[in-house]
Image: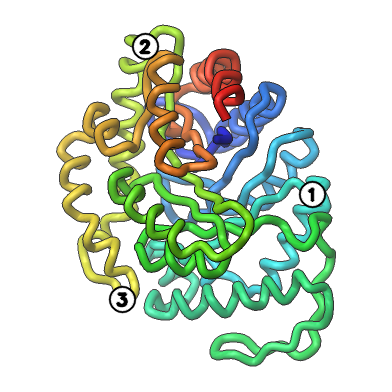
């Protein structure tokens, strides 16, 4: 298993930090993670989610990180394809792969926010067809020649995308996956899957079994799971810090997903079936409940390693660590990164 990092760039009121400081902290933390030996980092793309996520242009942040890091894989987690023209997406991919010297990982998805869909003038009911057609164009760009495509949403006559990515044949492609149908589609398409952070592990585990059964490629399947993590030498202190921070973060996450969870939005029926878990978490978003649902890993290195092993046994190949759930001071995040690097990463490496 590989340990990656995951960033939403939240703005918790308790931290009293500016957006500029939040960006500076994230860049410094990720640069530290590069030196410490973590595998990669994934940055979300969210819009109009004040408080919960102020990371609307992850490609610009990854461009900065490409110059400040040497080894980390740099992940777009994910590009909501319905909001973007696929030629622009392919150009972004090529540019970032060149700047990072071939370290880019590309996640795609549908997005889930009705506010985002309304702002960008897209109907949620068209999201699946938009993703499928956009993915076909992005893959056509990977071939390097002129793209000829005439579909439901886009028409291209001999378009050649520049620049070309460094990685051959293309940077690894992943998709956000929530519904069981998406896991099966991803397997047929040969895409890695990115699960979480709000879908409980028992449900994801069942989805992963379905995904592995449907996997057709000779390459091993790639499975990422996002989990809130805080690993400190003092487990009691870790839990004391994580309690209010995780409660804020997951309460905010439930707030931004509530419009889809509470009403039946076309093509988002599976979100509706997640409501019973939302009620459980919303009862206080208590750390114990989050841990029971597989949404949090908090404690000493030994405890965290035991929980991480459970994800690995379930088939997860990349654990996306949401350190402090994005709601703790940078000093604590850095402390946790160093604790994981010294006491967990080496043990995982020897067990694989």
Rendered residue at 62%/86% (across/down): 154
Rendered residue at 58%/44% (across/down): 42
- Quick one: label 3, few (<14), some, or many (20+) residues within 10 Å? few
Looking at the rendering, which quadrant does residue 247 occupy? top left
Q: Position of residue 143 (x, y in %)?
A: 79, 73
Q: Position of residue 164 (x, y in %)?
A: 83, 64
Circle 3: element type = loop
| Residue 170 position (above or below residue 334) | below
Labelled disc at residue 266: 3
Q: Quadrant of the N terminus?
A: top right
Circle 1: element type = loop
Q: Position of residue 181 (x, y in %)?
A: 38, 68
Labelled disc at residue 235: 2
Circle 2: element type = helix
Q: Which residue is mark 1?
A: 102
| Residue 159 position (above or below residue 250) | below
* Residue 164 placement, left or right of 114: right
Q: Earlier in the sequence, mark 2 or mark 1?
A: 1
Q: Earlier in the sequence, mark 2 or mark 3?
A: 2
* Residue 32 placement, left or right of 256: right
- Quick one: label 1, few (<14), some, or many (20+) residues within 10 Å? some
């Amino acid at each position: 298993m590989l340990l990656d990092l995951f960033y939403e760039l939240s703005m918790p009121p308790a931290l009293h930090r500016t957006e500029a400081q939040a960006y500076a902290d994230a860049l410094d933390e990720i640069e530290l993670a590069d030196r410490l030996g973590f595998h990669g980092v994934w940055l979300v793309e969210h819009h109009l989610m004040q408080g919960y996520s102020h990371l609307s242009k992850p490609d610009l942040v990854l461009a900065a990180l490409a110059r400040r890091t040497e080894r980390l894989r740099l992940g777009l987690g994910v590009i909501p394809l319905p909001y973007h023209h696929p030629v622009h997406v392919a150009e972004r991919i090529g540019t970032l792969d060149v700047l990072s010297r071939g370290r880019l990982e590309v996640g795609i998805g549908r997005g889930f926010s009705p506010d985002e869909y309304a702002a960008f003038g897209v109907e949620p009911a068209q999201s699946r067809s938009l993703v499928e057609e956009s993915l076909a164009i992005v893959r056509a760009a990977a071939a390097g020649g002129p793209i000829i495509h005439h579909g439901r949403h886009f028409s291209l006559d001999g378009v050649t995308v520049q620049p070309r990515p460094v990685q051959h044949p293309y940077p690894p492609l992943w998709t956000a996956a929530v519904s069981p149908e998406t896991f099966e589609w991803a397997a047929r398409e040969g895409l890695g899957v990115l699960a979480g952070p709000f879908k409980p592990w028992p449900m994801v585990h069942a989805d992963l079994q379905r995904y592995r059964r449907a996997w057709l490629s000779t390459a091993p399947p790639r499975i990422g799971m996002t989990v809130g993590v805080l690993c400190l030498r003092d487990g009691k202190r870790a839990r004391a810090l994580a309690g209010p921070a995780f409660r804020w973060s997951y309460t905010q996450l439930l707030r931004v997903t509530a419009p889809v969870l509470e009403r039946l939005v076309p093509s988002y029926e599976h979100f509706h079936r997640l409501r019973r878990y939302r009620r459980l978490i919303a009862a206080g978003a208590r750390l114990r409940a989050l841990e029971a649902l597989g949404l949090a890993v908090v404690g000493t290195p030994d405890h965290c390693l035991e929980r991480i092993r459970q994800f690995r046994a379930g088939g997860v190949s990349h654990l996306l660590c949401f350190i402090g759930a994005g709601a703790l001071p940078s000093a604590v995040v850095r402390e946790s990164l160093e604790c994981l690097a010294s006491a967990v990463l080496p043990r995982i490496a020897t067990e694989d």
